[in-house]
Amino acid sequence: PIWPRPSGWVNKITQYFLVCVCVCVCFEGLPTYPDVSRMWEIVDKYHVTKFYTAPTAIRLLMKYGREPVQKYKRDSLKVLGTVGEPINPEAWQWYYSVVGEKRCPIVDTFWQTETGGHVLTPLPAATPMKPGSATFPFFGVVPAVLNESGEELEGASEGYLVFKQPWPGVMRTVYGNQQRFETTYFKKFPGYYVTGDGCRRDKDGYYWITGRIDDMLNVSGHLLSTAEVESALAEHEAVAEAAVVGRPHPVKGESLYCFVTLTDGVTYSRTLEAELKKQVREKIGAIATPDFIQNAPGLPKTRSGKIMRRVLRKIACDERDLGDISTLADSSVVEHLFQNRCCVGV
Ligand code: AMP
């Protein structure tokens, strides 16, 4: 085995936790149909205590303001969870103050299908929160931050997020393909489980996921995290959601191609475009100034709400061979984005 198997007593503890019971309300459908209060209506109706969703849903609902949330009672709520992608501080604040009325802790849970459970997460109401950080490792989980050469970085640092030892629930193989398991997760840095995500650890030891390593951009030799640029764009009140991808550039290597979905009622204009560029430059630095900004009323997402950046990269480069897009929730947005793509940088 690549890692030691969890021993007998560890499995016993897992079984103990598995017998704890709770009632779950699972919602499948659009959070905006028949109207944008749908989530809160369900919370009110079933007295939901712990509400768990993805940042993409929060950003979508933010577009419509507070009124649709405040129409329904949410006093049953105790904990608000977020998962699936880095949550930008803007969305975090809205979730915390509008949905949770500043009384519910936000639990930003970082995990993967492969990890079988949360690996970085605050303990609700016990861990002091920082908007946008998944905070600290869960019990038994030992993370490390590695540089490109596989060296462990100490203290405040940024690099590859890996784990140093197994825990109950972590995947043990890829069904029928042990070789693939070893290559995908253990080959790049032998002895570590490689998540494929980048992260930053701040001086207080908090972990901040910066996004998939494949989503890093190299602009004139500077490594930029797309999540960081997206967050800077989303801080503008006119922007409900942003997705940033790289487009090859003859001089800089890569340029930043940004898709922005505007808040309900806002119209796209050159003035807004200039403001957005300025905002990113001020928040991150001149190197991150967007080269292209495209107004995107809709973004290509999977049914679980993840933005398909692979498709956005193709749109940015005007390449029509999209490969398999059967997991897209709504494929019509793709054609619309192709028709309105930016040909010249702003
Ligand atoms: P999946 O296996 O489909 O659940 O996707 C796992 C991936 O989602 C991770 O590798 C991360 O890229 C992302 N992810 C999940 N939770 C978080 C989180 N709390 N913050 C940032 N990214 C997350």
Image (cartoon, helix red, strand yellow):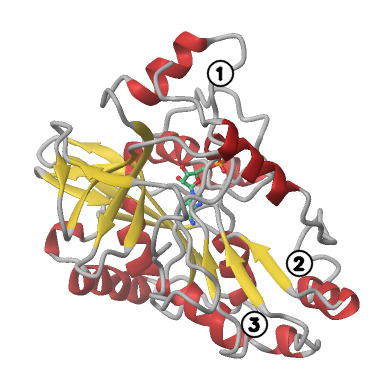
In the rendered structure, which amino acid carries the disc numbered 3?
Answer: Val
Q: Secondary structure at mark 1?
A: loop
Marks 1, 2: nearer the viewer: 1
Under 8 Å from ligand 1: the CB of mark 3? no
Residue on which disc 2 sits: 32
**Local crowd size for mark 1, using a 10 Å CA cut-off: few (<14), some (14–19), many (≥20):** few
> Left or right of 336: which side holds 146?
left
Residue on which disc 1 sits: 174
In the rendered structure, which amino acid carries the disc numbered 1?
Answer: Val
> Quadrant of the image for the C terminus?
bottom left
- Tell which residue pokes out farthest to the right in this image: 45
Q: Which corner quadrant of the image does residue 24 belong to?
A: bottom right
Query: Is 166 above or below relative to 211?
Result: above
Residue 298: x percent and y percent? 59, 55
Residue 180: x percent and y percent? 46, 13
Which residue lies at the image location 81% right of the left edge and 87% below the top edge?
72
In the rendered structure, which amino acid carries the disc numbered 2?
Answer: Thr
Residue on which disc 3 sits: 99
- State the separation of the CA atoms marked 3 and 1: 39 Å
Q: Which corner quadrant of the image does residue 219 belong to?
A: top left
> Left or right of 243: which side holds 162?
left
Q: Secondary structure at mark 2?
A: loop
Which residue lies at the image location 60% right of the left edge and 89% below the top edge?
103
Q: Earlier in the sequence, mark 1 or mark 2?
A: 2
**Local crowd size for mark 2, using a 10 Å CA cut-off: few (<14), some (14–19), many (≥20):** some
Which residue lies at the image location 77% right of the left edge and 56% below the top edge?
20
- State the separation of the CA atoms marked 3 and 2: 16 Å
Residue 120: x percent and y percent? 44, 55
Q: Earlier in the sequence, mark 3 or mark 2?
A: 2
